[in-house]
Image (tube, helix red, strand yellow):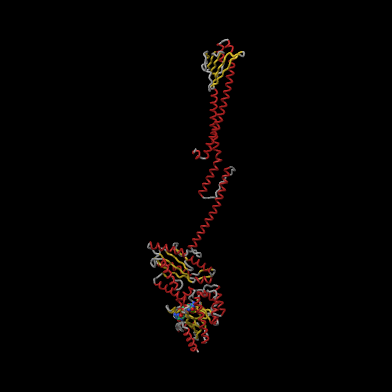
Amino acid sequence: MSLLRNSSIGNKLLIINIASMSVAMFILVLSIITIMFFSSRNSLLEDVRNQVHILGESLAPAMLFNDMETAKALFTALPPYIEYVTVLDKQGEEFISYSQKTDTVNVPAASAAKNYFPKVYIDYPIVVNDRAVGLIQASASLDKIYDQLAKFLLFTLFSLLLSSALGILMLRHLQTYLINPIVGLTKSMRLISNTDNYSLRFHLDSKDELGELASGFNTMLNKIQSHQVKLDAELVRRREAEDRLQQLAFYDNVTHLPNRHFFKERLESVVTSTLRYNTSCCVILIDLDDFKNVNDTLGHHVGDELLKAVAERLSKELRGSDALCRIGGDEFAIILDHTDEIMQVEYIADRMIRLLSLPFMLQGQEIFIGASIGASFCPADASDIPTLLRNADNAMYSAKNRGKNHFLIYKPDMDHKSMKRFTLENALRRALELEEIFLTYQPFMQIDTNKIVGFEVLVRWNNPELGVVQPADFIPIAEETGLIIPIGEYVLYEACLQTKHWRKDFGFEGTISVNLSGRQLLKPDIVERIVKIVQSVELPFNLLNLELTESILMDHSKETFDKLEALNNLGFSISIDDFGTGYSSMSYLKRYPINTLKIDRSFISDLPDDANDVAISKAIIALGQSLSMKIVAEGVETKEQLNFLEACGCNFAQGFFYSKPMSAEQAENFILTRQSHSV
Ligand code: C2E
Ligand code: CA
Ligand code: CA
């Protein structure tokens, strides 16, 4: 039974077919044989009866006359299937008997008249004139019938075998209609489950149960496929969400660089392996100079674009293994793994400074920034992350203090400097309220008349612990921290007040020049602020001169232009400070409303001996004259310088030659002595 269960459908069909055919044939053959047997037997009986009847008719006279010879002769005519005949007389005595086998007729009685299965027996009375004169007992053999039946059986078996063989062949052929679709369906199922390709379908054109099975299978696949599509979409959504989370957690949204979080993790693993394998690594911190200006003037959108461009330029310079990260607003960091060569780090930093000092083209305009870079090595400078970072930070700030575009590797004395900076920053925050900020005044003079044209206000900070701090030491910190706004406004207010006082009390007619930081000019309401302060003091607007450095004007933005135009239209005059040190492009001179050019001290100090300085200062004077601007020479210390400048056509000068920056009282004296002197 288990054989049947485990065999293929084809074999099952074959076995079932053979079994059912065999049972049917067996019953059919048995029925035919039974019918044949009984009908043959009945006809045999009939024949025997007829023969015995004829024999009885013929025997009767022989028995009456006891004529044995005639009687014997009668038996010879009997058909061969009658095997035994016994004739009894009326007393029941055997009259004569006959045996087919021995072909003898015996007189002795034979009591073979027994009826058993293979033979038929018949008793037949011999009647003469309605009187029984004797009895014939005959038996006939069924052998002939058996022979016939055996032949029939043989033939039937043969035809059965033949038809079975044909049937099997036909079945084998026909069952393909049944089995092939099932095999095909099974193959499709296997293929789909192996490849997970739920878009496959099994096509079957029949409309029977197999057709229904195939269409049910396809319907099921449709459902699986649509579920699969939904599942795939869900998976994609999840993966995207995970990626986004990962991106948010470890990457910066603007530049797509790794963020501070990533940087810290990476640094931790690099430092750990550096210490374990006795190698060396380096952290480089990059801080963009002037980025805040761009962000404030041109907006965050341009600021973001700039950061992206910076990230792109920096990335190109690095190996794949060097991690470049954005760790703050305008701060980037690089981890150089397996690096102990100062030369290599210097080379990279140099390249980066050069790359970042090239202009960036954003929104159709050139934007200039720069970078201050500091680096620290592990384990040479520090073997723990906080110290390593602090060192790199100190190096970076020391680089910044040197001016733009500098790179420094950490040195232990920087700690002192950074502490100093830290102290300065904290003290500066309280300088205004503690009234530690005060003003000094340096006159600038008309060379030919030796008259005071005006005073430039130069701020100082007097701290009880630090002493008098020079602007070079605290203005950059004030700009970075934003403290320059209140300090600048305080200076402006005090300067205007002082000027008004000098005008009133000493008849001073000169102007007052105030330095305006780039950070101040970025204030959207800077014009209103200045106007408000000057108005509050009631100083005529045309007495105030605002000094701006070239770099402030380099952004070429419409906002800057509008502000300067507004200030100029209100009557304030505008000077370019430190002229010649900023940028090569002079186009801004034509664009902005500029009244005065102040030739930078660096071009004056070596006059009249240095040929280059001679050429430059002459060129600046010529340029200013051609643009109808006033020219002021800064940092004039000697008579020779003054004579040379005057000869070149420069009408105004400022510098130690006349006076160092002075207190208000000293300036008052200066005004008084000059006035009396010039009178
Ligand atoms: P600056 O505007 O170029 O100021 C001129 C600087 O040159 C002053 O330095 C002045 O003391 C110095 N100086 C003038 N004549 C001579 C000379 O003959 N020889 C030499 N060697 N130096 C001379 P100071 O006062 O240290 O100011 C430095 C800078 O700080 C200024 O340069 C200016 O950019 C900035 N600053 C000063 N006060 C203010 C302020 O109130 N606001 C802003 N935003 N910046 C200020
Ligand atoms: Ca100045
Ligand atoms: Ca200057």
Residue 193: tell me if it is visible.
yes
Residue 614: tell me if it is visible.
no
Q: Considering only vertical position in the picture, is 362 above or below 512?
A: above
Q: Furthest-right residue in view?
A: 129
* Image location of residue 15, percent across then percent down: 52, 36
Q: Furthest-left residue in view?
A: 278
Which residue is depicted at the point 58% across and 24% down? 39
* Image location of residue 674, percent across then percent down: 48, 87
Q: Considering only vertical position in the picture, is 418 above or below 631?
A: above
* Image location of residue 215, percent across then percent down: 57, 46
Query: Is 200 positioned to the left or the right of 414 in the image?
Result: right
Q: In terms of depth relative to the viewer, which is nearer, 231 or 592?
A: 231
Q: Furthest-front residue in view?
A: 91
Numbered-mark total = 0
* Image location of residue 221, percent across then percent down: 55, 49
Query: Is 208 positioned to the left or the right of 421 in the image?
Result: right
Q: In terms of depth relative to the viewer, which is nearer, 573 or 194?
A: 194
Q: Considering only vertical position in the picture, is 66 above or below 604?
A: above
Q: Considering only vertical position in the picture, is 492 above or below 242?
A: below
